[in-house]
Image: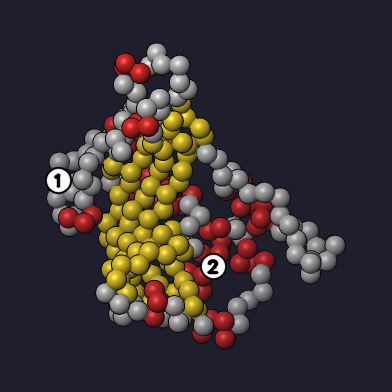
């Protein structure tokens, strides 16, 4: 599908001629009209995302699974049960791809050829390895918990030794990162503009609703501050 539309802020940035020179082919952007290598923009997308799609190889097959994550500097952390494929199949190091996409709107054209979406996407390539240091494991788990619900780790009971033993944590060092962004209205063909057909953008907003307590919450226990923080973060 053809994507047409206004230039984005990323498009307007000056890109050094050798910016992609040292990147392997898989980490280079094929078309730069919506892409860029702005790390600050990429980190902003990562920090605002709720879930990542992580790609890896298992049994000689490509796999992609959704995962919760957290970021500390130039390192991303993911976790899962020690017996899951993505944890169990990683040896000392393993190549991973990691993508987070924020959907901002449906772009509705008078011609279906120009239908699109407004979005912000960060794409990461790097090598993952098991985290074995106990201090780093705890910090990674804190970061992943608080990424979605800031402050929730301190509100919760400590993890039990058996829970820590059953949990595997991977650290993904960000070797290459890029972004792809689309903003603005549909790119229409001039001859279609006078057609009696609606065109424009339908905004997509993400918001957390009012928390629903389970049957075991006592009536005098209020909703925690972490949920209010999450509502503010993902508004």
Of residues 96 and 66, the one drawn nearer to the viewer in this rendering? 66
From where the camera sits, is residue 50 visible?
yes
- Closer to the camera, 106 or 27? 106
Residue farthest toward the top in the current orientation of the protein: 194
Image quadrant occupied by the N terminus: top left
Crowd class of label 1 (few under 14; some 14 to 19; many from 20; radius 10 Å)? few
- Which dot marks residue 98? none
Locate residue 62 relative to residue 143 in the image: left or right. Answer: left
Across and down, in percent, residue 89 comes to: 35, 79
Q: Residue furthest right?
A: 219
| Vertical order, 21 against 194 (above or below) | below
Provide the residue designation for mark 2: 142
Q: Give me the residue at 78% from left, 58% from top.
A: 222
Q: Which residue is mark 1?
A: 18
Residue 195: x and y, percent?
A: 41, 16
Q: Position of residue 137 (x, y in %)?
A: 47, 75
The earlier-in-sequence mark between 1 and 2 is: 1
Identify the secondary structure beneath mark 1: loop
Please tell me whether residue 216 is drawn above or below residue 50 in the rendered image.
below
Residues under numbered marks 1 and 2 in contact, where contact means CB atoms less than 8 Å apart:
no
């Amino acid at each position: 599908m053809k994507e047409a539309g206004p230039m984005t802020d990323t498009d307007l940035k000056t890109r050094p001629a050798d910016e992609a020179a040292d990147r392997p082919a898989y980490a280079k952007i094929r078309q730069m009209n919506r892409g860029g290598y702005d790390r600050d923009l990429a980190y902003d997308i990562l920090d605002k995302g709720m879930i990542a799609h992580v790609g890896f190889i298992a049994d000689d097959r490509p796999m992609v699974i959704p995962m919760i994550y957290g970021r500390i500097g130039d390192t991303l952390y993911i976790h899962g049960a020690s017996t899951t494929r993505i944890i169990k199949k990683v040896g000392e190091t393993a190549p991973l791809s990691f993508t987070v996409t924020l959907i901002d709107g449906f772009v509705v054209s008078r011609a279906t050829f120009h239908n699109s979406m407004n979005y912000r996407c960060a794409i990461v390539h790097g090598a993952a390895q098991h985290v074995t240091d106990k201090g780093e494991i705890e910090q990674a788990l804190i970061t992943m918990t608080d990424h979605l619900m800031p402050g929730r780790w301190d509100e919760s009971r400590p993890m039990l030794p058996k829970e820590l033993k059953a949990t595997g944590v991977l650290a993904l060092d960000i070797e290459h990162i890029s972004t792809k962004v689309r903003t603005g209205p549909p790119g229409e063909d001039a001859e279609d503009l006078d057609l009696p057909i609606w065109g424009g953008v339908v905004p997509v907003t993400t918001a957390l609703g009012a928390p629903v307590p389970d049957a075991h919450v006592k009536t005098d226990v209020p909703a925690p501050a972490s949920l209010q923080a999450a509502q503010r973060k993902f508004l």
